[in-house]
Amino acid sequence: MKATGICLFLFMFLSCMNVLAQQEDTSSRKVLFQVRGGINISNVRATHDNVTFEGNEKVGFNIGAIADIPLGKDFYLHPGLLFTTKGVKVDDILVEDTYYKADMNAMYIQIPLHVGYKMQLERWDNRFGMSLGPYLAYGIGGKTDYTTKRGKASIGIDTFGSDYMWNRFDVGIGFEIYFELKRLVLTTGAEAGFTR
C-alpha cells in the first residue's frame, strides 16, 4: 500500500509442486532447474491516514522456474523467476468519506534468492530441505473492486494507480520447507513483504 504506512503481505505456498527439469545424479551435484506451480493464500495488514485495517485471506496462484545451484556440501542457492497473484478482501475500508467492501487483486513478477540446506533421507532415497532468503517483486497489473456496504454501487480501479492502493515494487523475505522425490518437489512456505 502507499507511503503513510507499512504493508505486510503474508502468503503461504500450499500444494506447491516443482518438477525437476533433468534427472538428478547425486554424485555429480549439477545445476538443476525446477518448473514451479502452486497456490497462494495472501493477506494484507496496512495503515492509511492513521487507520489500521486487516483484510481476509484471498487465494491466488504462482508459476515459474527455480534454479538449484550447489554451493558446497548440502547447501544450495535457489534463484528464480515467478509470476504470482496476491490479493485481499476488506469488509470495511474508508475511501473519500464512504465505507466500502474491497476486493483487491495484484499480479507480480517475483525474483526470490534463497539459500537452502538439504539432508539425504537414505531410507527412502529422498531429500528433505529448507531455504530462506529475500525476494524482489514488481507489480505488472491488478484491479480493485469497491462495493458500497449495501451493495448498491460498485467501482473498479487499478490496484497500483491510486493513493489508496499498493506500490508496484515490493521487497521481502521468504522461507520454504520442501521434500524432494525423484522428479517432484513438494514445497510449503511463507513470505512477508514490506512496502513503504
Image: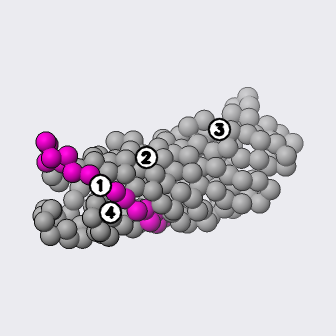
Say which element carries label 2: strand
Q: Earlier in the sequence, mark 2 or mark 3?
A: 3
Looking at the rendered structure, the secondary structure element under dot 4 is strand
Lower position in the chain sequence, tag 1 or tag 3: 3
Question: Are the residues tagged 1 and 3 within 8 Å (C-beta)?
Answer: no
Mark number for residue 195? none
Residue at numbered disc 4:
75
Q: Position of residue 109 (x, y in %)?
A: 48, 64
Percent position (x, y) of residue 5? 76, 53
**Residue 9 in the figure: left or right of residue 184:** right
Q: Which residue is mark 2?
A: 189
Q: How many angstroms separate mark 4 from mark 1 (CA)? A: 7 Å
Measure the C-alpha gap from mark 2 to mark 1: 15 Å
Q: Residue furthest front?
A: 73
The answer to which of marks 4 and 1 sits earlier in the sequence is 4
In the rendered structure, which segment of residues is drawn in magenta?
109-126
Which image quarter is the C terminus in? bottom right
Q: Is residue 161 magenta?
A: no
- Image coordinates of residue 95 in percent, x first then y, are 80, 45
113 and 163: which is toward the camera: 113
Task: Give the residue at mark 1.
Answer: 118
- Say which element carries label 3: loop
